[in-house]
Amino acid sequence: MGNRPAELRRAIDSVLQQEGADVEVVVVGNGADLPELPEGVVTLRLPENVGIPAGRNEGVKASAGDIILFLDDDGWYRSRDLARHVHDRFAADPGLGAISFRIADPDGGPDQRRHVPRLRAGDPQRSSAVTTFLGGACAIRRTAFEQGGGLPGEFFYAHEETDLAWRILDAGYDIVYDAEAVMYHPAVAPTRHEDFYRLNARNRVWLARRNLPWPLALCYLGTWVAITLLRERSRPALRAWFAGFREGWREDAGPRTPIKWSTAWRMTRVGRPPII
């Protein structure tokens, strides 16, 4: 977005310092000018802010690597061995489609539960198979990204990575949460984003409409209505959430390609059935 040049340079440096793997860097200015960057960095300036998923899709088009890593400009990699670690994991397992990294607080605070993409999130140091990944802290096999159709650009923000993750799983790949692959990121609340509640609800409806067989879609959305009512106490937040929920039903969600029932069963065996 062009408003964190120092943080952006820190993020780029942490990638350029990786050892033992061939790494290319593409920086997308999402409707924003880019500062002067190190030699060799590919820059892509979009004329307007097209949102997180569409911006990342443009970055993928400008890259050539077999493994795609997304990194937000306020994040950075702790270890210089991360790229080699990721490369070796994909090389050892042809069925691995994506890796979700562990996000650590640089100030030493506790790892946030929402950064662990599974229901049993109490131990962020435990690696496991999962059914989604974190968009700004992940690695994806390019062939899996392409078979999944890329990120849904119309989502703009929220749940776009889960949409892709479900399609990667449906293509037969696995997704893992790897606690050894660490990205530093300041502890921030997702509600800082304007329209967080509206987009969160709208995109959750789109996610279900696009990807789930109707019995599962209705269970999934009913579960999240109940969870939202139990969790949220702010009336303005609830109004925004339910406005987005209605919007998700009224507006076009894009192509509907429900996952196979066998994929839903795989997700259930991993520990997260697609109803929550």
Image: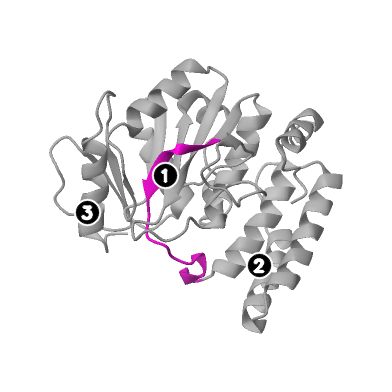
Three-letter amino acid code of the residue under disc 2: Gly
Quarter residue 251 falls in? bottom right
Q: CA distance from mark 2 to mark 1?
A: 23 Å
Quarter residue 15 falls in? top left
Three-letter amino acid code of the residue under disc 1: Arg
Residue located 77% across and 57% down the image: 221
Foreground residue, 221 or 77? Answer: 77
Q: Residues within 10 Å of mark 3 (few under 14, many from 20)?
A: some
Residue at image mark 1: 56
Give the x, y percent position of residue 223: 79, 58
Q: As displayed, is residue 12 above or below residue 261?
A: below
Q: As displayed, is residue 86 above or below residue 155?
A: above
Q: Residue furthest bottom?
A: 235
Residue at image mark 3: 34
Q: As displayed, is residue 144 above or below residue 43?
A: above
Three-letter amino acid code of the residue under disc 3: Leu
Kindly state the secondary structure of the residue where label 1 is placed: helix
Foreground residue, 139 or 253? Answer: 139
Is 54 on the left-hand or right-hand side of 221?
A: left
Q: Is residue 274 visible?
A: yes
**Precedes in sequence: disc 3 or disc 2:** 3
**Precedes in sequence: disc 2 or disc 1:** 1
Residue located 65% across and 61% down the image: 202
Kindly state the secondary structure of the residue where label 3 is placed: loop
Q: Which residues are magenta?
A: 177-194
Residue at image mark 2: 244
Q: Is residue 64 visible?
A: no
> Which mark is drawn over residue 12?
none
Q: Residues within 10 Å of mark 1 (few under 14, many from 20)?
A: many
